[in-house]
Amino acid sequence: MTSASPRFRALRTASPFETASTRKDRASYNLSVSRVATRGSNVKIVGALGLETLTPTTTDRRATPTADISNRRIEDPSTFSAIARARAEAAAHPRFGQLSVAAHSNADLADQLAFDYGRIEVHPMVDLTDEIAGTGPMKYTATGEPVTAESEARFNEYARNFQAASRALYNAERGKGTNSADIFDKLIALGDAQPAEFRAMLNWELRDARTA
């Protein structure tokens, strides 16, 4: 089997979406990034941008989406304006919902997230357990499929398109005066609309083939 390129062989211990500024502000916003779980000779990549608790220190005048995050239930969506519906749906996102709610409550965090995700650099989420143990190849975390030269080439093409689209969306919305929290929501929706194979390579939905 064709081995993966050196770029993919780096042990990734954090989310493929983490940026310098999210690392810098992680303490103040209590953002947690899971690390490599090591047990004996088994090393598994579990990188994910998580949110254990989030207590913004400042609050602006933006309306927080009316949504029940505990069970993802949107209250009376038919009574919302289009913008309010979009915000409520973003708040109910299974992965990024809590970040969206926080962004709509904190202008500094919203600016940071919109800027960072608008210039997102993505990498595949991989599981090195078998490769390190010498029992198999490196695999994509979400699917368990081996990383090959062919799949790397497809990923690189997907990534170029996604990154270009993210930057274009950010610039267009900023030019229209869209607020940062809504830009962040739109960028996450753009990620949701990417091809299924690309989302699986990124582990966009945070799945683990070993525990499925």
Image (cartoon, rainbow, N blue to C red):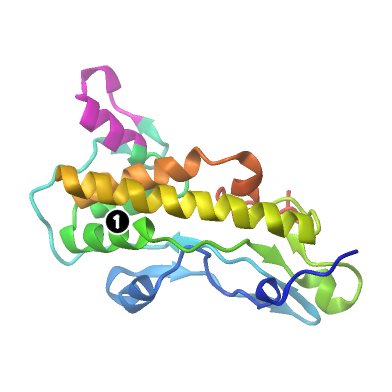
Quadrant containing the N terminus in the rendered view:
bottom right
Residue at image location 62% in from the left, 57% down from the top: 156
Residue at image location 36% in from the left, 42% down from the top: 69
How far across and down, in percent of the image, does residue 200 sit?
Answer: 64, 48
Q: In this view, does 76 lie above or below 156?
A: above
How far across and down, in percent of the image, does residue 28 sit?
Answer: 27, 74
Residue at image location 24% in from the left, 57% down from the top: 110
Q: Is residue 90 above or below residue 82?
A: below
How far across and down, in percent of the image, does residue 75 sit?
Answer: 29, 27
Identify residue type, mark 1.
Answer: Ala
In this rendering, position of residue 161 left or right of residue 137: left
- Is residue 178 shown to the viewer in this render? no
Q: Mark 1 highlights which residue?
A: 114
Q: Which residue lies furthest to the top in this view?
A: 78
Q: Give the range drawn in magenta.
A: 74-89
> Based on the displayed image, in which of its 4 quarters is residue 72 positioned?
top left
* Secondary structure category for the residue under label 1: helix
In this rendering, position of residue 77 left or right of residue 134: left
- Is residue 60 shown to the viewer in this render? yes
How far across and down, in percent of the image, does residue 150 sit?
Answer: 77, 55
Foreground pick, 94 / 155: 155
